[in-house]
């Protein structure tokens, strides 16, 4: 595909077409370490503001989690809104939420056909509950609509099950202004836009060491040294020796996903919602792609395996949630390591003069990487200090190898609790229906007895 205005090819092979390594000393205003969604967003925004920008990537653009995501764009963070308010107060929470909305709008603007074409944009996101939470739903909707200026609709159980033919879900919150895009094409489109803006991207160029003292920071690579006034650490859990202590504040979580074979009309008979769907417990996340295929994200682990090993597990999960689909085959799989923070919020801000961090975007959504790009670029170039809003979410050690085992155990436990709560909720629902049917039959029998009619 080509952009009509620029005749630039977008797609997964763009990075390979002109991949270059840093082989000579270089000075720049800004050096971004990490060419994922966050790093490229920061580089693009800084270049648009007039800075000279270099991006160092140890492998290739978007090689891990950034190139393996579902492409959902909606406001908010991984931390529940009520917890965010409790941590920072209502006013700061509102400002942070507004910034996340700006990030979502930035992605939407780039998804326009004349900026990054062929992103297969679809509208709407639906968050469904594993249990019956009617009263909590009403309170949340009031908060979103009144206090956070966010369009959100409450869906009753009947409407959820009309759109999703399964008994596993109860109420839902619909975000009509959320969107989905082809995440891989968006990532490569960001790289191309950054290059067009003057950003120099060096792949196969890991940062071996970092000296952050002084006005000009020094970054050493295998074949050359780079100096920059500002350095942004956007390498997630893969920063390694230049910022090992920062990497240790993230719990690496591998999220796997698959895409089914074409399912034809039977998919439309079971799923009538064209946006993305996620459950409130964060277990499943899915949406229709290419008209009649299902993209499904599940499960999570704290270690890396080959994604294809989970093809059958994903297929079984789909059949568990939607038994009416029957047997399905998962023909494509992908996955990557996300960096998840202990407190559930992204790491965005200045660690010391000229040294910035943009990390911890696991479970945060595409909007937060775009938001980080805007905030850090403005902080570096225009001295906008709104990154201080994230100061309460300090860098917390994630526990190292022990933390991985604990994190896996907690994740398994949470999924088991969620499954049990869902099972109990569905049992109570069935029991209630049986009781209503029994009472209806009893009332009918009493009515017939009172009129002298036959009793069934």
Image (cartoon, helix red, strand yellow):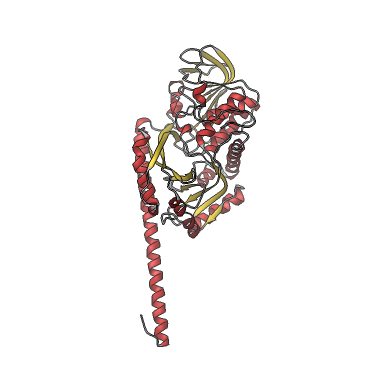
Q: Residue furthest bottom?
A: 452
Q: Position of residue 373 (x, y in %)?
A: 58, 31
Compare residues 219 and 34 and report the one nearer the observer: 34
Residue at (38% x, 32% y) in the render? 399
Q: Position of residue 91 (x, y in %)?
A: 60, 43
Picture quadrant of residue 333: top left
Residue at (48% x, 60% y) in the render? 158
The quarter in which the C terminus is drawn is: bottom left
Q: Position of residue 40 (x, y in %)?
A: 55, 28
The quarter in which the N terminus is drawn is: top right
Residue 185 vs 210, above or below: the answer is below
How many numbered badges does the structure rendering display? 0
Residue 423 vs 362, above or below: the answer is below
| Residue 393 visible from this viewpoint | no
86 horizontally vs 437: left or right:
right
Q: Position of residue 280 (x, y in %)?
A: 46, 48
Compare residues 409 and 273 and report the one nearer the observer: 273
| Residue 357 visible from this viewpoint | yes
């Amino acid at each position: 595909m080509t952009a009509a205005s620029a005749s630039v090819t977008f797609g997964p092979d763009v990075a390979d077409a002109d991949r270059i390594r840093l082989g000579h000393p270089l000075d720049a205003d800004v050096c971004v370490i990490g060419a994922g969604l966050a790093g490229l967003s920061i580089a693009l925004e800084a270049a648009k503001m007039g800075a000279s920008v270099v991006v160092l990537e140890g492998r290739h653009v978007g090689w891990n989690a950034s190139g393996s995501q579902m492409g959902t764009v909606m406001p908010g963070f991984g931390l529940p809104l009520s917890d965010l308010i409790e941590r920072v107060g209502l006013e700061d929470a509102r400002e942070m939420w507004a910034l996340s909305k700006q990030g979502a709008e930035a992605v939407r603007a780039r998804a326009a056909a004349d900026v990054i074409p062929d992103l297969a944009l679809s509208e709407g996101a639906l968050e469904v509950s594993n249990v019956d939470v009617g009263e909590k739903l009403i309170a949340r909707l009031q908060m979103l609509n009144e206090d956070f200026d966010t369009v959100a609709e409450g869906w009753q159980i009947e409407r959820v099950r009309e759109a999703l033919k399964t008994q596993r879900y109860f109420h839902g919150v619909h975000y009509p202004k959320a969107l989905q895009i082809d995440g891989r094409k968006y990532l490569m489109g960001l790289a191309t836009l950054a290059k067009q803006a003057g950003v120099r991207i060096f792949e196969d160029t890991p940062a071996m060491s970092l000296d952050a003292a002084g006005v000009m920071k020094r970054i050493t690579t295998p074949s050359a040294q780079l100096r920059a006034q500002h350095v942004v650490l956007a390498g997630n859990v893969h920063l390694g020796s230049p910022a090992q202590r920062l990497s240790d504040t993230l719990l690496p979580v591998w999220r796997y996903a698959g895409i089914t074979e074409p399912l034809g009309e039977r998919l439309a008979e079971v799923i009538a919602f064209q946006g993305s769907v996620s459950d409130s417990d964060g277990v499943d996340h899915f949406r229709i792609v290419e008209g009649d295929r299902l993209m499904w994200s599940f499960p999570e682990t704290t270690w890396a395996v080959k994604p294809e090993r989970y093809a059958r597990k994903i297929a079984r999960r789909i059949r568990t949630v939607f038994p009416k689909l029957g047997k399905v085959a998962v023909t494509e799989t992908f996955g990557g390591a996300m960096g998840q923070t202990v407190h559930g919020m992204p790491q965005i801000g200045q660690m010391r003069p000229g040294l910035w961090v943009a990390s911890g975007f696991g479970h945060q959504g595409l909007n937060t990487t775009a938001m980080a790009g805007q905030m850090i670029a403005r902080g570096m170039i225009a001295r906008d200090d709104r990154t201080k809003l994230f100061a309460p979410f300090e860098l917390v050690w994630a526990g190292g190898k022990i933390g991985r085992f604990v994190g896996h155990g907690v994740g398994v436990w949470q999924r088991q609790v969620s499954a049990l709560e869902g099972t109990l909720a569905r049992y109570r629902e069935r029991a209630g229906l049986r009781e209503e049917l029994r009472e209806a039959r009893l009332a009918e029998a009493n009515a017939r007895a009172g009129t002298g009619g036959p009793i069934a």
